[in-house]
Image (cartoon, rainbow, N blue to C red):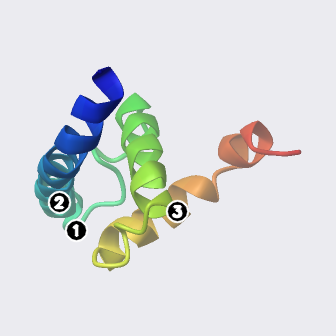
């Protein structure tokens, strides 16, 4: 059945996904070197997309090894529009 197959595949798939995410984290760290935003000198949609992905990475504990990305995410989460969108 599908659930048995999934249980057997999950560890391998999770390992591949984690390795890919760690590679992407390194690329993002390099892209942010000396910069405040991902693209150019101002906030863009790219920052929204990257912050969203980093939020998930933080949720599963993957940003602990990437303090630059954690700081970038904190900066994005401090924006007024983010605060309004996540208000209770």
Q: How crowded is mark 3: few (under 14 residues within 10 Å), some or many (20 or more)?
A: few
Say whether marks 3 and 1 touch (CB < 8 Å): no
Q: Which of marks 3 and 1 is nearer the N terminus?
A: 1
Say whether marks 1 and 2 touch (CB < 8 Å): no
Specify whether residue 32 is in view: yes
Q: Earlier in the sequence, mark 3 or mark 2?
A: 2
Q: Is residue 16 left or right of residue 34?
A: left
From the image, tell me which residue sits under label 1.
34
- Residue at 12% in and 48% down: 16
From the image, tell me which residue sits under label 3.
75
Which image quarter is the N terminus in? top left
Say whether marks 3 and 2 touch (CB < 8 Å): no
Q: Is residue 21 left or right of residue 2?
A: left
Q: Say which quarter of the image contains residue 3.
A: top left
Image depth: mark 3 or mark 1 in front: 3
Q: How crowded is mark 2: few (under 14 residues within 10 Å), some or many (20 or more)?
A: some
Which image quarter is the C terminus in? top right
Specify whether residue 39 is in view: no
Image depth: mark 1 or mark 2 in front: 2
For marks 3 and 1, give the CA distance.
14 Å
Q: How crowded is mark 1: few (under 14 residues within 10 Å), some or many (20 or more)?
A: few
Residue 37 position within the rendered picture, expressed as x and y whole percent measured from the top left: 35, 51
- Residue at 28% in and 78% down: 65
Relative to the observer, which residue lies in front, 17 or 81?
17
From the image, tell me which residue sits under label 2.
22
Q: Which structural element holds mark 1? A: loop
Q: Which structural element holds mark 3? A: helix
Q: Which structural element holds mark 2? A: helix
């Amino acid at each position: 059945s599908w659930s048995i197959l999934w249980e057997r595949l999950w560890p391998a798939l999770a390992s591949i996904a984690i390795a890919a995410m760690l590679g992407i984290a390194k690329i993002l760290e390099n892209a942010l070197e000396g910069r405040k935003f991902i693209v150019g000198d101002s906030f863009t949609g790219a920052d929204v997309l990257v912050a969203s992905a980093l939020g998930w990475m933080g949720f599963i504990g993957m940003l602990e090894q990437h303090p630059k990305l954690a700081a970038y995410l904190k900066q994005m989460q401090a924006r007024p529009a983010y605060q309004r969108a996540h208000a209770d």
